């Protein structure tokens, strides 16, 4: 099982970034044969590119990172996306997921603004609202159980 976790990163608040660790923990507990890509993995790949190519221009490093990111989306069996915060990069990832007919679970914190572009483009996707991290954990476990058991 190959899963891609998407969500806001550079524009995200600390609380949002910490949620990606929750997704990672639950997914690793659920799937034995998991190949997981999280926002941290994308940034780790970017940093690796910088370390290996210190003379590359920023645009070249960014291109390598984007290519890696979108390849992971295309190769994933499932996209789990927290849309509690807005992100241009996430929108691009979702466009690629949509083009490649990927199964998507959207999670969002109660009270979050959900773009009409997302709700209109992914009408067959599951949209799951949560009030707090405990509820996020419960609903994520529930969705994964129903999806794959």
Image: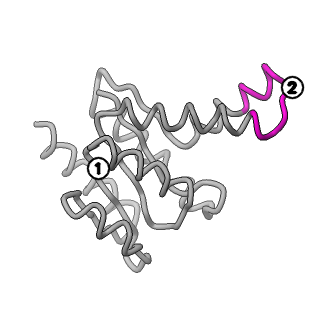
For the residues labelled 2 and 1, the Cα–Cα distance comes to: 36 Å
- Density class for disc 2 (Cα within 10 Å; few <14, some 14-19, many ≥20) is few
58 with respect to 12 (left or right) = right
Residue 144 lies, in percent from the top left, at 21, 44
Name the residue tied to disc 1.
104
Q: Residue 47 sits in which quadrant?
A: top right
Q: Which label's residue is closer to the chain start, 2 or 1?
A: 2
Q: Magenta-highlighted stretch: main secondary structure? A: helix
Kindly identify the residue that appears in the image at 29 percent across and 53 percent down. 105
Which residue is tagged 2?
Answer: 54
Q: Which residues are magenta?
A: 47-60
Q: Residue 5 at x, y = what percent? A: 43, 44
Left of 16 or right of it: where is 106?
Answer: left
Looking at the rendering, which quadrant does residue 55 occupy? top right
Depth order, front residue of 106/98: 98
Q: Do tag 2 and tag 1 residues touch (Cβ < 8 Å)?
A: no
Residue visible at 86% across and 25% down in the picture:
54
Q: Could you classify mark 1 by the number of other residues whose Cα lies within 10 Å: few (under 14), some (14-19), or many (20 or more)? A: many
121 displayed left or right of 83: left
Residue at figure coordinates x 10%, y 37% from the top left = 149
Relative to 27, residue 128 above or below: below
């Amino acid at each position: 099982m190959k899963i891609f976790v998407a969500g806001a990163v550079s524009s995200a608040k600390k609380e949002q970034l910490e949620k990606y660790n929750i997704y990672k923990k639950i997914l690793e507990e659920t799937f034995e044969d998991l190949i997981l890509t999280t926002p941290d993995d994308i940034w780790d790949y970017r940093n690796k590119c910088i370390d290996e190519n210190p003379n590359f221009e920023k645009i070249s490093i960014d291109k390598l990172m984007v290519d890696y990111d979108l390849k992971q989306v295309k190769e994933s069996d499932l996209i789990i996306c927290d849309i509690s915060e807005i992100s241009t990069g996430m929108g691009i990832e979702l466009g690629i997921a949509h083009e490649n007919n990927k199964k998507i679970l959207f999670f969002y914190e109660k009270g979050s603004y959900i773009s009409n572009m997302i709700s209109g483009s992914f009408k067959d996707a599951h949209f799951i609202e949560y009030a707090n991290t405990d509820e996020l954990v419960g609903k994520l476990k529930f969705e994964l159980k129903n999806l794959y058991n």
